[in-house]
Amino acid sequence: MGSFTLFPHIKSRTENVLCTAFVTFHTLHFHYAVL
């Protein structure tokens, strides 16, 4: 992926939501992988 930015003006609100969902999904996946 490109550079990881958390600024609200990524490109659009949709991309911001998708980015948040992507990070959340991988965080939960990693958490359950550890368990």
Image (cartoon, rainbow, N blue to C red):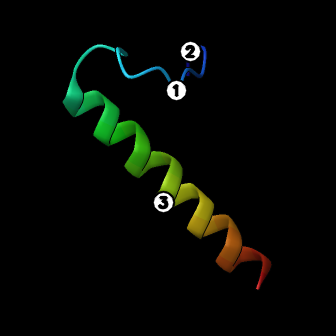
Q: CA distance from mark 3 to mark 1?
A: 16 Å
Which residue is tagged 2? 2
Q: How many marks?
A: 3
Q: Distance of mark 3 from mark 2, alpha carbons?
A: 18 Å
Is mark 3 in CB contact (under 8 Å) with mark 1?
no
Residue 3's place in the image compared with 20, above or below, is above
**Quadrant position of residue 9:** top left
Kindly identify the residue that appears in the image at 66 percent across and 79 percent down: 32
Q: Is residue 16 above or below residue 18?
A: above
To which residue does mark 3 refer?
25
Q: Residues within 10 Å of mark 3 (few under 14, many from 20)?
A: few
What amino acid does circle 2 point to?
A: Gly
Query: Which type of secondary structure does the marked residue at label 1 adopt?
Result: loop
Label 3 close to label 2 by CB (< 8 Å): no
| Horizontal relation, residue 5 to residue 17: left or right | right
Q: Position of residue 12 (x, y in %)?
A: 22, 20
Q: Quadrant of the C terminus?
A: bottom right
Q: Is residue 10 above or below residue 26?
A: above
Mark nearer the N terminus (3 vs 2): 2
Q: Amino acid at mark 1?
A: Leu
Which residue in the protein does label 1 denote?
6
| Residue type at the position of mark 3 | Phe
